Image (cartoon, rainbow, N blue to C red):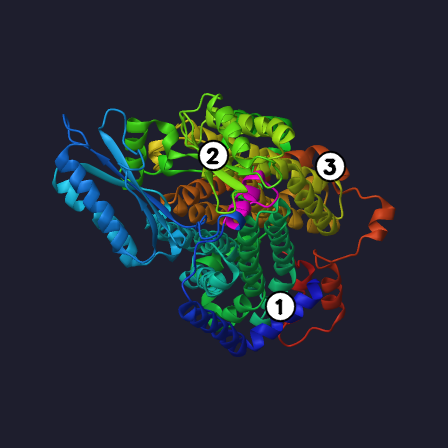
Amino acid sequence: MATFLYKLGRLTFRRRRYVALIWVALLALAGFGAASASTAASSSFSIPGTEAQRAFDLLEQRFPGSNADGATARVVFKAPEGEKVTDAENKGEITGIVKELRSGSDQVAGVADPFEAKAVSEDGSTAYISVSYKVNSMELTDETRDALEGAGKDAQSSGMKVEIGGDALQVMPHTGTAEIIGVAIAAVVLVITFGSLIAAGLPLVTALVGVGIGVSTITALASVMDLGSTTSILAMMIGLAVGIDYALFIVSRYRAELAEGREREEAAGRAVGTAGSAVVFAGLTVVIALAGLAVVNIPMLTKMGLAAAGTVSIAVLIALTLVPAALGFAGKRIMGRKARKAAEAENRPEAKPNMGTRWARFVLRKPVWVMLVGVLGLGIVAVPAASLEMGLPDDGAQPKSTTQRQAYDTLSDGFGPGFNGPLLVVVDAKNSSDPKAAADQVAKKVESLGVAAVVPPAFNKAGDAATITVIPKDRPSSHATEEVVHDIRDAGKDIKADTGAEVLVTGATAMNIDFSQKMNDALLPYLALVVGLAFLLLMLVFRSILVPLKAALGFLLSVVAALGAVVAVFQWGWLGSLFGVEQTGPIMSMMPIFMVGVVFGLAMDYEVFLVTRMREAYVHGESPGQAIVTGFKHGARVVTAAAVIMIAVFSGFIGSSEQMIKMIGFSLAIAVLFDAFVVRMAIVPAVLALLGRKAWWLPRWLDRALPNVDVEGEKLQKQLTDEPADAEGGGDGGERELVRV
């Protein structure tokens, strides 16, 4: 592989104009596709194989035209102090708004008058209008949203408090200025690392090109492939981070080759042939982790993972082709004067050891203590993970300043928390001899479970299916509501045995419960698949069994610690105000498994980049301890810069208005912090120091069975050493030290 990539690096350097034109054309094509594509609807949320999804599908079959997936809204009214919504003036205002909503848009499917639908609280202080739409929230027009938002303004002027809840006001999430700050921090880190504006700007520009192509492609295909609004944001988050990192490693290696006196084309070839090999395998681990999300069998999550994996693949291709081409355009300006002097000083035998060298020597002196401090420290941070509660956020997780949150709180005060998350019980009475009696039996049984209210059964035209709306006593995300769902389902088994009617529970709350359960069930198979495949991949790279095993165990430790930090901030509220968390609650169901997928790939990035250099030194005759020092001497600074950039980019998304994006941004940033600086920089060298030569042990039969992918560039080194020195190589004998990753 190193030989092929070496030739590719030289080719793209020589043909840099053509390479640059190809990538610019791809960017323009993707941009044109995104600009001309139809507006994407919201991604349909389905959970195959769950009871809630089966009930949802049954509703679409037996209740045609019910718009089961249509947007909904609740216009909530609270009368002024000392008044009631049933007072003549207030009632007249509300009735007028009902008429206004019915005629306000042709997308409205139905509007329920609160005085006819009994949607008035017992004390008469609160009422709500239920609005259903023919299309989902992302397909609502601006005119429809404006009509909804403007409907209550007149009522507010009369003194009533009017708030709007539901998903009808759902809009595309925005990430705020913090995202730009993240990129700015990355730029500062690159300038400090390279000491050259040209060298610092090159990874940023190439990464932005890759992200532009990836996100534009996702936008262009969003409508056709039913991609949700968060798909492109997550792809941008991951693509930007790895794109900068991969370019960073190639540029760093190129500058090291120039410092040794090689001509520019030769340096580009060697940079891509060596550091590029690590980029390929690091990218493969990320792609495996993201594409492996398909194992969960939730279409939305699968699409998110594949879209992000595609963006990472583009980042790898850009690092191998556009980056060496851009190095050709940069010329000798890629090496600033100070950077050149620093590189020359570092290469002198009497040079002062850099920070990476000093740290590695310290770890070699105290490996047991370093390992214990690292493991115990992460173990303490991981303690809150034992209290992890998972669910999906509702309007109760919105900032208190939003109308959705105000509507949620007003409904809770006037009717009880359960009104924010009604359950929908679907009775399939097709095989029942008396459908009406079966539905009535279900309603009575549910009522006996201690819920707040049960709406009488409503049958379809055929009379073979009925829906029963159930209002729990507690909020949608509570354990009590989850128990009610399970109790109804358990009771349904007995009812089916007695009457032949099948009882199914659905609705947003039931869907959330089923989603969380599916996430839990899929976590272990997903871990086994991803870690297993990556273990085999790392065995190819390192020709070892213990090194990949150590890498996987270290990753698990950092992920559990990151989960503990997420629970402490978002569930317990510790330091919540610092991160803009206004409402604590359960951790989003998809977050742990998504974090596992992304962070595993990124953790293996640092493992590959750092340990490959150790493996290179060991293969070329250094002792295990000296190989660790060599690896840190050449790799620690670059890996540190890469990790800081990752953390900066991910932290930028903490400023998002969307709770899911905020939580994922925080979790990825803290996980990279733990994995890069505690696991890879401390625990890994400590364990390798304790293992000694055993770390690189591989059974002979397995060594013969595994293909040699030549990540260390041994074949390339031999080929270059055997060939006569060419004009570009300069015959300086610098081939002896080939890889500096």
Residue at the disc numbered 1: 269
Residue 388 visible within the image: no
The number of numbered badges drawn on the structure is 3
Q: In the image, what residue type sits under mark 3? A: Gly
Q: Nearer the viewer, mark 2 or mark 3?
A: 2
Is the residue 437 above or below the residue 622 in the image? above
The 10 Å Cα crowd at callout 3, few under 14, some 14 to 19, many 20 or more, is some
Left or right: residue 633 compared with residue 724: left
| Residue type of the residue flagged with mark 1 | Gly
Q: Say if residue 222 shows up in the picture.
A: yes
* Quarter the N terminus occupies: bottom right
Q: Which residues are magenta?
A: 45-60
Residue 386 is left or right of residue 419, and the answer is: right
Membership of 338 in magenta stretch: no
Whole-percent x, y for residue 462 in the image: 52, 47
x then y, percent, for residue 125: 22, 28
Q: In the image shown, does 116 or 156 lie closer to the viewer?
A: 116
Q: Is residue 251 left or right of residue 5?
A: left
| Alpha carbon separation for disc pair 2 and 3 | 41 Å
- Dot 1 or dot 3: first in sequence order is 1
Residue position for label 2: 587
Mark 1 / mark 2, whichever is N-terminal: 1
Q: Residues within 10 Å of mark 1 (few under 14, many from 20)?
A: many
Q: Residue at x 12, y 37 (%)?
A: 89
Q: Secondary structure under badge 2? A: strand
Quarter where residue 367 is shown: top right
Q: Is residue 47 magenta?
A: yes
Mark 3 lies on residue: 692
